[in-house]
Image: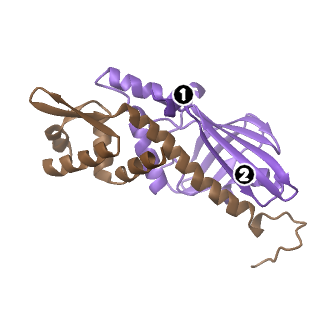
Chain colours: A brown, B purple
Amino acid sequence: MATYGGEALAALGDPTRQAIVELLADGPRAVGDIAAHLPVSRPAVSQHLRVLKEAGLVTDRQDGTRRLYQLDPGGADAVRAFVDRFWSRALTAFKSAVESDENDPEESETHEPGD
Amino acid sequence: MSQATETPVRQSITVEAPIERAFTVFTEKIDSWWPRDYKIGATDMKAAVLETRQGGRWYEQDEDGSECTWGQVLAWEPPTRVVLSWQISVQWQYEPELAKSTEVEIRFTAESDTRTRVDLEHRGFDRLGAGAEEMYGAVSGEGGWSRMLVGFAAAVTG
């Protein structure tokens, strides 16, 4: 799960790939159709789709003479992976805060204002 | 829908602080640690707020003066337990319906007078998954998990 989520996160770190995922959220599309909606070339779209596919976010299938790309239903697991990472970072920040002087109770004797 | 989607996210952390302080910092002083880029508003976040009572809200206050609700306090049992609804939709916006929301339970356990274990469980991802399944049943969908993915990606990577 961790690796999967990490890959999905990395894949979505790119604005063009985010835009492709948004487009595919409305339904399956061919490469040319995706390229028509974005300011990038077909080969560039193909490259981005390859990354999304390897990250488990997108699948493809042959439809007559066209190859259609669509979101991978299993990608919903990535949401969970993101939440996992989300809390990991938040809890680390919480630990720092709760152990810092700033959150010491007033009766603390070790607190040094202005430290 | 896969098993993983129905499995809660579980995380634990041990902090060097008494249980009362751990609980207070997590809740009342949430603003002291909540990552500033974990927000849903359009402008920068000014503060994270958690109303310390059952039925209270937890929300962000933004620089433009607006408030964006994240959810409500479903259970308030200081200093051992708090349950929060996480009402963030797949469009990365406030979700008014609890039935379409996930929830977060945080438990605090004193390991000693100065050490507290914090166990967090974020569950209900299958409720979000319903949208994803509909999405594949029809060509025109609401976007399902993908927009949430994008939102999370933006939030996590800043």
**SS assignment at label 1:** helix
For the residues bearing labels 1 and 2, Cβ distance under 8 angstroms: no
Numbered label tally: 2
Up the image or down, B138 lies above or below B63; here it is above
Does any portion of residue A40 appear in the rendered image? no
Which is more toward the observer, B25 or B94? B25
Residue B140, picture quadrant: top left
The foreground one among A114 and B20 is B20
Q: Would residue A14 be seen by someone viewing this image from the given angle?
A: yes
Tell me how far mark 1 sits from mark 2, CA to CA: 25 Å
Which residue is tagged 2?
Answer: B26
Tell me what residue is drawn at x 42 percent, y 45 percent: A4
Is B143 or B48 nearer to us in this picture? B143
Identified by mark 1, the residue type is Lys
Task: Name the amino acid, label 2.
Answer: Phe
Crowd band around label 2 with a 10 angstrom C-alpha radius: few (<14), some (14–19), many (20+): many
Considering only order in the chain, which callout, 2 or 1, is on the residue closer to the N terminus? 2
Residue A67 found in image quarter: top left
Label 2 lies in what chain? B
Residue B22's spot in the image, x, y percent? 78, 54
Query: What residue would you read off at disc 1?
Result: B100
* B150 horizontally vs A46: left or right: right
Q: Quadrant of the N terminus of chain B?
A: top left
What element does badge 2 sit on?
Answer: helix
Q: Is residue A49 above or below residue B31?
A: above
Residue A59 sits above or below residue B45 on the image: above
Residue in front for this viewpoint, B2 or A98: B2
Percent across and percent down for residue A50 are 24, 46
